[in-house]
Image (cartoon, rainbow, N blue to C red):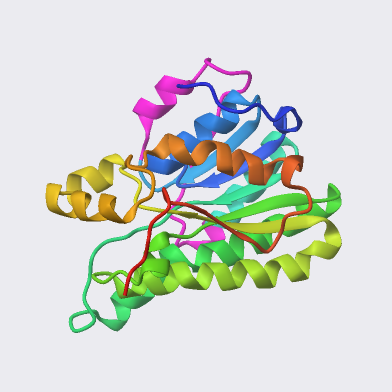
Amino acid sequence: MNTYAIFKDLEDTSVFITGGGSGIGASITEGFLAQGAKVAFVQRSNCDEFLNKVSSKYKHDPLFIKCDITDTNALKDAISDASVANGGINVLINNAANDSRHSLAEMTTEEWDQSINVNLRPHFFTAQAVAPFMKAQGGGSIINFSSASYLMGNTGYPAYVASKAGITGLTRSLARELGVDGIRVNTLIPGWVLTERQTKLWANDKDLASHMEKQCIKEHLMPNDLIDSTLFLASDASRMMTGQALVIDGGVVVTG
């Protein structure tokens, strides 16, 4: 792992991350562990390789709780368990998502609901669950991951794009409601990040080249490129920043 910015106030803080064992989520988990934070994360699938990689490497080992985030009760139970284990919840990262491709013509009601249940609904109910812990602790930071796909108006996954747009609206509303309790809520909007999943399923030479033409910075985004920005939003370094959307996309130029 490379050297990243150090935010001393994050040491020993309690962080809860959805989808924290693979892709962007794994990078974020390790980024917080490297700060000396206590990290709990949920994921539907096992992540033994990642856990073996980070165990005993940092001040605190991560707490992995296997959980399907579409099961709201199980998700709330996981947050409660993490709070008991790590002494409350200071930072919530809503990262988990599923960008499976689909079309307007062929999508069913059940598939639409499933997309929303993965990509938007958990952001609301995790915030609902952590808010009392954060209020009792005098504040906290909620970071909702969206996607530049909705800023670009991408085709091929309209339910996903709609949910990612909805996240920014939810963020602004929660920032207003929770700000009185010292709880900050911000959105982080990544561009096209070349995770293992993206490389395996969607990335091809033609699309990568086309996307690179739209970026000001001529490098593809990698999962580790989201670490510093997430740490910043979690830290007191951004203590007066809330209701905002921070775009990390290499400077994509949208045309048309």
Residue 68 within the magenta-colored segment of the rendering:
yes
In this rendering, the answer to whether 223 lies above or below 76 is: above
Q: Quadrant of residue 1?
A: top left
Q: What stretch is highlighted in magenta?
A: 46-74
**Residue 23 percent coordinates (x, y):** 37, 41
Q: In which quarter of the image is residue 4?
A: top right
Q: Quadrant of residue 254?
A: bottom left
In this rendering, the answer to whether 56 lies above or below 139 is: above
Pick the residue in front: 147 or 42: 147
Q: Is residue 113 left or right of residue 69?
A: left
**Residue 79 percent coordinates (x, y):** 62, 49
**Residue 45 percent coordinates (x, y):** 35, 43
Question: What residue is at 35 percent from the left and 74 percent from the top?
Answer: 159
**Residue 229 percent coordinates (x, y):** 57, 42
Question: What residue is at 21 percent from the left and 76 percent from the top?
Answer: 103
Q: Is residue 88 visible?
A: no
In this rendering, the answer to whether 71 lies above or below 226 is: below
Question: What residue is at 45 percent from the left and 42 percent from the top?
Answer: 25
In this rendering, the answer to whether 69 lies above or below 37 is: below
